[in-house]
Amino acid sequence: MPIEITMPALSPTMEEGKLAKWHVKEGDSVSSGDVIAEIETDKATMEVEAVDEGTIGKILVAEGTDNVKVNAVIAILLQEGESADAIGAPKAAPAPKPEAKAEPAPQADAGATMRENTATQAKPDIGALVAKGTEEARGKVANSNAPNGKVFASPLARRLAKEAGIDVSAISGSGPHGRVVKSDVEAAKSGKTPLKAAATASAPAAGGAAPTGMTKAQVLALYPEGSYELVPNDGMRKIVAARLTESKQTIPHFYLTLDCKIDALLAAREQINATAPKGKDGKPEFKLSVNDFVMKAWAVALQRVPTANATWAGDSILYHKRSDVAVAVAVPGGLFTPVVKSCDTKSLRQISEEVKDLATRARNKKLAPHEYQGGASSVSNLGMFGIKSFSAVINPPHGTILAVGVGEERVYADAGQVKIANFMTVTLSCDHRSVDGALGAEVLGVFKGLIENPVMMLA
């Protein structure tokens, strides 16, 4: 009997991905362990190996296809003695129901994408559900024939609306007798068709609907056609937008800023780097950065003020035993936040090497899910761009994020004398639900002490 090869889950929370590349073609023989395809998510690209031997009888999902759901059949493997005649119609692609507007089978539909962290798994990933609306959804008949408040909608439309956080009763139906169908939900999500009411499933119970900003149609109407290039958002940008919008709308941020004198840190860095042995090419085997000291100092500070090493979990607060600190890594089209586990227990050299490795693999989309999930806090450093100070957005479910500016010479007063020293401005963003003002000030003060006296972070 032919074997169905299905879309694998690259992490426990993955729900769909892109079939980036096939390494085989129909008619090729494969053995267990052979690489047959590459699967791409918003975070990583991984190889898929065959688990059985046989012949590739049929490839059902073309190379480059987006939004392929986990467990969807992507190819058929024929066993010894079987021919292509044994291949039946794939289970995942039933024929559309006969309607005035037939709806495609659920498999071809875009579902929720992989979440970045465990605290948001239960919440629909709205940003990843955005899809292009259809022209047919424009100007259609409103869903006005819903007696006794009943809304006529197909099961698929109801599911998509629920996943997108949209009240199905707010969508104008274009199907028979005003029935809401899939294309209506997609048009509502893309902003091509306005909602009849601004109610959403995620709106606060007593305060009206959550603000959604301008729709795509409203934005495009402000600019002459041809004066811009319209580039659709990829999966990474959609998730970044959704996560940070969620963060600013649901997390009560507050900010604390301090200036840290870093002359002692710079001197220690220079002394340590001078001890680095040279390789065969004459280059030093390691070179510590200021950010390595920042990561170490922040991880140690979270250990010395353990109540600040916290994340909000609804009706509870998680106080973490380890200082797992994420570091923001900019990549084309977005950013990653790989996590340095038990950062407080590692040497500066270990932190330096691990951050470089994580950053390199992040830019190449080679991180495993466990390497960018979790953590209780983050560090975001824009000093290399000359940024003096900034306030970073908390990455859920983290309780804090430390924003680091450039180190520079500044004039300051000391006991009535004007002096010059190197200073660095840092701003701590706190989730007020788990880290309040006094607690945030305490942990930031400990960090300042460690940065200004780096030998103390080794004690």
Image: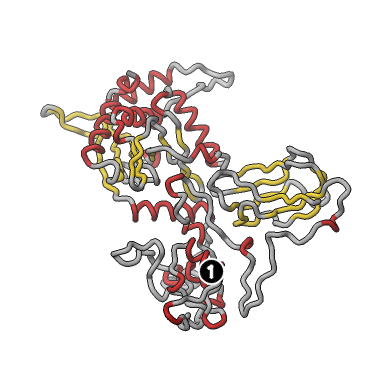
| Residue at mark 1 | 157
User: What is the quadrant of residue 154 in the picture?
Assistant: bottom right
Give the residue drawn at x 49%, y 40%.
372
Q: Of residues 426 and 433, which is closer to you in this image?
A: 433
Say whether residue 403 is visible: no
User: What is the quadrant of residue 290 in the picture?
Assistant: top left
- Residue occupying the far front of the picture: 148
Q: Secondary structure at mark 1?
A: helix
Q: Of residues 141 and 334, which is closer to you in this image?
A: 141
Question: Would you place residue 137 above or below residue 448 in this image?
Answer: below
Say whether residue 181 is visible: yes
Instruction: Give the image location of residue 198, x and y in percent.
Output: 38, 70
Under mark 1, the amino acid is Ala
In the image: residue 440, left or right of residue 230: left
Instruction: Give the image location of residue 189, x and y in percent.
Output: 48, 67
User: What is the quadrant of residue 383 in the picture?
Assistant: top left
Instruction: Give the image location of residue 233, x and y in percent.
Output: 51, 58
Question: Would you place residue 204 above or below residue 23 in this image?
Answer: below
In the image: residue 21, left or right of residue 422: right
Question: Would you place residue 448 above or below residue 121 in this image?
Answer: above
Quadrant occupied by the C terminus: top left
Give the residue drawn at x 21%, y 34%.
411
Q: Of residues 458 and 389, which is closer to you in this image?
A: 458
Question: Would you place residue 381 above or below residue 177 in this image?
Answer: above
